[in-house]
Amino acid sequence: ELDPSLPTAQPSPQPLSNNADPTLMAAALALTVSALGRQAAASEVTPVQKVIQLMEGMLAKGKSEKHDEQVQFAAFKQFCDDTSVEKKRAIEEASGNIDMLKADIEKYTATAAKLTKEIADHDEDISVWTGDQKAATTVRDIEKADYDALHQDYSESVDAIQRAVAVLKKQSHDRKQASLVQVSSLTQLSLIPDSAKRAIDAFVQQSQSPEGLEVSAPEAYGYEFQSHGVIEMLEKLLDEFIEERTKLEKSEMNGKHAYDMLMQDLTAQIQQATQDREEKSEVKAKTLQAKADAEGDLKDTSDTRDADQHYLDDLTATCEQKASDFESRQQLRAEEIEAINKAIEIISSGAVKGNSETYLPAAFAQKGSALVGLRSA
């Protein structure tokens, strides 16, 4: 509905007739002479002059009202034009804003969907890398346990062989029976080859023989030769075990370094992915909030535009109706003014004026009351 505080076209005085005939109007106005008969008889102004004066007054009033109506309608039309321009501008601007808001909403929706997928990818990466860390740690713990056990075996074997070699290098008469136990204990080590264990057992048995203390010179020479062979065998094993233990230590060091580097790399990737996920989650939250704000603005803007369009439609219909009514009234008033002008011209003509001045005064005296009744009828 139109704002009642805004200017509207006020009702104008209605025209005298919808179809004014100057001849009939002149005849009708002639009847008014009866009302002026007695006044005209006592005055120097003739009845015709009086009628002309009355018609001229009507003419002036009609022109004035026609002009006033034009001024009034001009103000109303200016209001219609200005308001229409303003509303059209507001509607066009709102339509542009609506298009931009829809584009923004579409962009926010796409951005939020993209961020959701990227966050899910980060979550999956973090889960996989965390699993890799656990798996690598499990493997590393197993490798470390195996290393510790094998390194201990090598260290124990190296120590036992060193003690056994020291015992064997003593002269036979300096060896004690208890010392041979160290040599014999080598057979209990898992790393000692079976062939070496048999050689050690044979040597220990010979050394423990009662005749071993009373052997002849050739036999003693054979015993010493056998002892020398065992020593060489054990020293060779000693060198192999030390070398294998060294390789094992290097392998452990490399394995630990590789594990540390892997854990460092996985930790860095997890930290970076976690940071990226947090940042994208924050951006996603802001994007969704911006989308919600845009949707609210879109609704408000659409409602305002629709209200402006409804107002403009009502205003256009009202202004067009008022303009049509104004044109009709202006046409009628123009016709009335033209009719009055012609009536004045007819009454002011020589024939009408002469006859009226000759016969009207007597008629006024004889038929005044009849004319009054006719006018009233």
Image: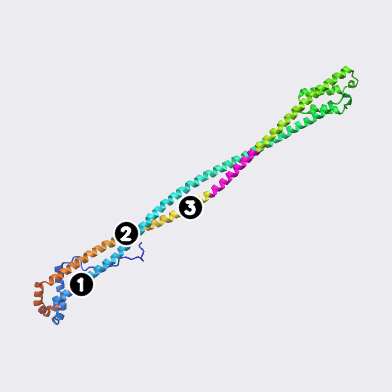
Q: Where is residue 60 in the image (x, y as percent from the top left)?
A: 21, 71
Q: Can residue 371 be seen in this view?
A: no
Mark 1 lies on residue: 58
Give how far apart the Cα atoms at labels 2 and 1 are: 35 Å
| Residue found at x 29% / y 60% | 320
Residue most extreme to the top: 218
Q: In this view, does 259 lie to the left or right of 95?
A: right
Q: Which range of residues does the magenta coloring cover?
A: 260-282
Residue drawn at (79%, 31%) of the image: 159
Q: Check residue 279 for magenta coloring.
A: yes
What is the three-letter code of the residue carrying label 2? Thr
Residue that lies at the very extreme toward the bottom in this rendered image? 42
Percent across and percent down for residue 71 are 28, 67
Q: Quadrant of the C terminus?
A: bottom left
Q: Name the residue under label 2.
A: 316
In the rendered image, residue 207, in percent from the top left (x then y), is placed at 86, 23
Residue at the spot x=45%, y=50% of the render? Answer: 104
